[in-house]
Image (cartoon, rainbow, N blue to C red):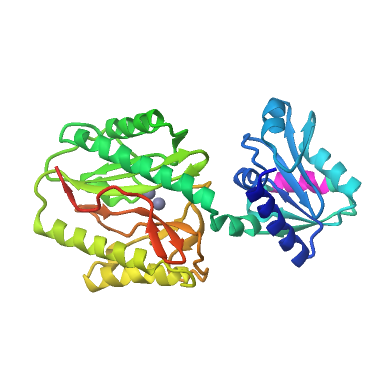
Amino acid sequence: MDAMRRKRRRALRRILAEKDADALLLTHLPNVFYLCGFSGSAGALLVTAGSATLFTDGRYTVQARREADGAQVRIVAGSLARAIGERLRALGCRRVALEANRVSVAQQRLLRRAGGTRVRWVAVEGWVERLRARKDPREVAVMRRAARMASRVLEEVLPLVRPGIRENEVAAEIEYRMRRAGASGPSFETIVASGARSALPHARPSGKRLRKNELVVLDLGVILRHYCSDLTRTVYLGRAPDRVRRWYAAVLEAQQAARQALRPGVLAAEVDRAARQVLERSGLGRYFVHGTGHGLGLEVHEEPRLAAGQKARIEEGFVVTVEPGVYREGFGGIRIEDDVVVTARGPLTLTDAPRDLIEI
Ligand code: ZN
Ligand code: ZN
């Protein structure tokens, strides 16, 4: 049995006891993987004080037996909900928590019916997500490799970023190189946004050709051994005019300020504030239209969110992105994004691609 996963299940069981719940039914697959190592694309995990049961179907018989760690495997031929209901009755569970933001109304109805009248379902949120926010050393090591891999892919592809090539060609080159480098895929749809399109923070690569004297935002990440990385760099095709230089310097300063602010005990909102203050001082506050960053791990967007009003406290072991940006319609966008792990000695940046304005 894996010691780290055993520790995670123990931490979850402490929450069950605190919240006076007999069981938690996990249906969100990254949470299932986190607690028992099963990486199939269908299944549910039921955790009680004394047991863990993985329910999945016949397609995953071999995989579940091989991967499931610290959990009994139930291969279910018919309805998963019915099998879960039977198990709950056999275990004598009364108060059963389910992941409120992960279960559809239809699934809830099936579970209610399957559990019968003795089971009381309680909707809960974030129990496992909160545990996942704090990465153990082994997770950080994998995430460092994922961050470095994204950095190398970006560097490799820069020579192709030239006037004439299409955005979607650059995106395809990026994702091809990720796979060749050993990634299981991109952690999200790669963004290549040029010219006026770079002002769209979540632009999809299009057939537009890159042109001279344009900004190009490249945002990419890999999945390596289930963990994500997320990296953005901004390129100028040609010699950047003064305004681009000034804006780029302000975004970079904001990014450094937020990275420096990432210390155990600080509020997520304060990290956002650190970046926002710099851009406001430069008169660019109104062009910074999103939060400063987000947690990163088994999913590309996790707890915590680094944004105004976020009261979560940053802890040692958190891995987050820091990605301030400015976007102005008709002019373009500039964003700089790195992945940072919070340590007792301060922030440690995992992505290692150069951060200066790239002029091609
Ligand atoms: Zn990104
Ligand atoms: Zn991001």
Residue 209 visible? no
Which quadrant does the N terminus fall into?
top right
Q: Is residue 267 above or below residue 256?
A: below
Secondary structure that dominates the magenta span = helix
Pick the front one: 262 or 250: 262
The part of the chain drawn in magenta is 105-113
Is residue 149 something that shows in the picture? yes
Is 110 included in the stretch rendered in magenta? yes
Q: Is residue 135 or residue 88 the one in the foreground? A: 135
Residue at image point 40% right, 68% down: 271
How far across and how far down the image is residue 79, in percent?
79, 34
For the C terminus, the quadrant is top left
Q: Residue at x 50, y 59 (%)?
A: 317
Is 213 part of what is drawn in magenta? no
The answer to which of 43 and 33 lies nearer the viewer is: 33
Q: How many marks?
A: 0
